[in-house]
Amino acid sequence: MRLTIENLHASLGQTHVVRGVSLEASGAQFIGLIGPNGVGKTTLVRAAAALIPFTGSVELDGASVSSMEPRARARAIAYLAQGAGSHWPLEVSRLVALGRLPHLAPFRAPAPEDEAAIARAMSLADVECFRGRDVLTLSGGERARVLLARALAVEAPLLLVDEPVASLDPYHQIRIMEVLRAYADEGRMVVAVLHDLSLAARYCDRLILLDGGTVKADGRPDEVLTPANLEETYRIRALTGGEGRESYVLPIARTDSLD
């Protein structure tokens, strides 16, 4: 799998949000897309999934995502939106099973391999305990895990997730980051919009720091999460370090003033 983005520009309404972003990624890796609010992270992943208009190019293995047949694109790219919800009273396993629709011929029931993919996704996202329940009876955090399971069930070579841990308690934040890490380790590419810098530093192979709609830094977490980048982009000072092999980034102060 090779993802190539060249000179991508995208707007929200009249606002030019992403400004000439170019990047390339190949092979199995977990990429964190980081940066302050409003710098274009969500817009970039939506454009990469061909969900919004853009100029420039986005290619998967040399094929333009905009030109791909929709079902083929849905098999190649799984996308979990920020704050995604469910508005219908579906039983949890049936909702997760929707992730297999790109693989099914019209009017065909799921095959054994589809049922196995659904079971794997539910196990990974830790939602087997909700089987049989109406998704609308779940809490926001529980529902977020079910929707992640739906995205995992696609078993796409490219998984795009927007703030996947935003509504979760600390245990499930770690659990979901472990799931995304494992998904990449199985030979796939994961691109996740993240705000928790410690989680990004700990689990991601590569971080892409956006600021003002452009790429400010791109590299290993220790190369990107430097004091200078944190101050210039986030306007914070932070403690950085590690416990064993695990890294952490602890914001401790703003660099601007209330004066």
Image (tube, grey):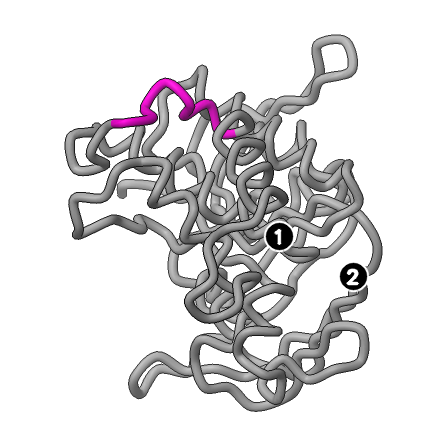
Q: Nearer the viewer, residue 133 or 4?
A: 133
Q: Amino acid at mark 2?
A: Ala
Q: Is residue 243 above or below residue 53?
A: above
Q: Position of residue 169 (x, y in %)?
A: 36, 20
Inspect this view and state whether residue 4 appears: yes
Q: Secondary structure at mark 2?
A: strand
Q: Is residue 61 left or right of residue 14?
A: right
Mark 1–mark 2 distance (CA, rounded to whole Å): 10 Å
Q: Residue at x 70, y 75 (%)?
A: 5
Q: Is residue 70 above or below residue 232?
A: below
Looking at the rendered image, the quarter that the N terminus falls into is bottom right
Which range is magenta?
A: 125-132
Q: Position of residue 251 (x, y in %)?
A: 49, 28
Q: Residue at x 76, y 36 (%)?
A: 222
Looking at the rendered image, the quarter that the C terminus falls into is top left
Q: Quadrant of residue 224?
A: top right
Classed neighbour count for the residue bearing mark 1: other residues with Cα under 10 Å, few (<14), some (14–19), many (≥20): many
Q: Residue at x 54, y 84 (%)?
A: 9
Q: Is residue 249 above or below residue 158?
A: above
Q: Position of residue 48 (x, y in %)?
A: 57, 71
Task: Say whether disc 1 or disc 2 marks the residue closer to the N-terminus.
Answer: 2
Instruction: Kindly identify which residue carries mark 1.
Output: 191
Instruction: Kindly identify which residue carries mark 2.
Output: 25
- Please report contact status of discs 1 and 2: CB closer than 8 Å, yes or no: yes
Q: Amino acid at mark 1?
A: Val
Q: Nearer the viewer, residue 249 or 24?
A: 24
Q: Is residue 100 left or right of residue 130?
A: right
Q: Secondary structure at mark 1?
A: strand
